[in-house]
Image: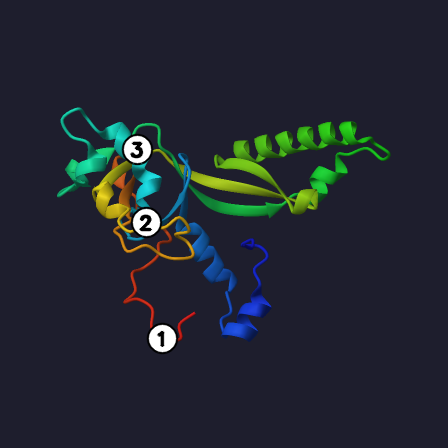
Amino acid sequence: MWLFTNPPTEILKTRFGFEPTPEWLEHVRKSAVRFSTGGSGSIVSPDGLVMTNHHVASDMLQKLSTREKDLLSTGFLARTRAEELKCPDLELAVLWEIRDVTDQVNAAVPDGAGVAEAGVARREAIAAIEKEAQDASGLKSQVVTLYGGGQYHLYQYRRYTDVRVVFAPEQTAAFFGGDTDNFEYPRFDYDVTFFRIYENDQPLKPEHFLRWSKGASEGDL
């Protein structure tokens, strides 16, 4: 795995003939979402449609189920936007800005400080950076520690809390042919769920989303 701010550009270019430009990296980053319940997804339409794996949605499908209708067993399809099911307690976050704050964090540590004192100083500096950034931008702001403390980056997220289920297959179709190591050996199944992000009670019109392709061809990276 690699950071958006530090991609293996030379390897990709020399080995595969592909160069991830800053514009491409920004587009991919701002087309991706993080689920507060755990997992990731992609924005895949100009109307805020989000695609993810079925297991990422399973907790929410369970919450939205009733005694009469178990959405994990039966699946769900909203035939109109009015039928889309609003999710309780779900937040999707898009990583919108990244800033290196290593110098700010390290500058807060006094010369000659012991391990404990240095740790306290760093935590105080991080908390101050996060608060200042969030107050100034309104974006959720979090300082992440990278390379075992070698670098500190400020991640700022756009958050969306009005998220609705659009489609999910029944669980038996989503996990048909499941393998333990499913990332190494892809399953033959329908492992997908679609959500939609809303903003001000209207479908989100995202600045970035991933467009559908016709699929991979022989020799594609």
Q: Residue at x 35, y 28 (%)?
A: 89
Circle 3 sits on which residue? 60
Q: Earlier in the sequence, mark 3 or mark 1?
A: 3
Q: Earlier in the sequence, mark 2 or mark 3?
A: 3
Mark 2 or mark 3, which is nearer to you?
2
Q: Earlier in the sequence, mark 1 or mark 2?
A: 2
Element type where label 3 sits in the image: helix
User: 69 and 156: which one is in front?
Assistant: 69
Query: Where residue 114 sits: x, y (%)?
Result: 82, 30
Residue at the limit of the structure toward the right, as seen here: 112
Inspect the image, locate mark 3, and give the three-letter code of the amino acid beneath it.
Met
Circle 1 sits on which residue? 218
Circle 2 sits on which residue? 178
Name the quadrant containing residue 74: top left
CA gap, disc 3 to disc 1? 37 Å
Inspect the image, locate mark 1, and give the three-letter code of the amino acid beneath it.
Glu
Query: Where residue 41 sits: x, y (%)?
Result: 37, 47
Q: Residue at x 56, y 53 (%)?
A: 3
**Residue 162 visible, this angle:** no
Name the quadrant containing residue 87: top left
Inspect the image, locate mark 2, and give the three-letter code of the amino acid beneath it.
Gly
Q: Relative to 148, is 39 on the left or the right?
A: left
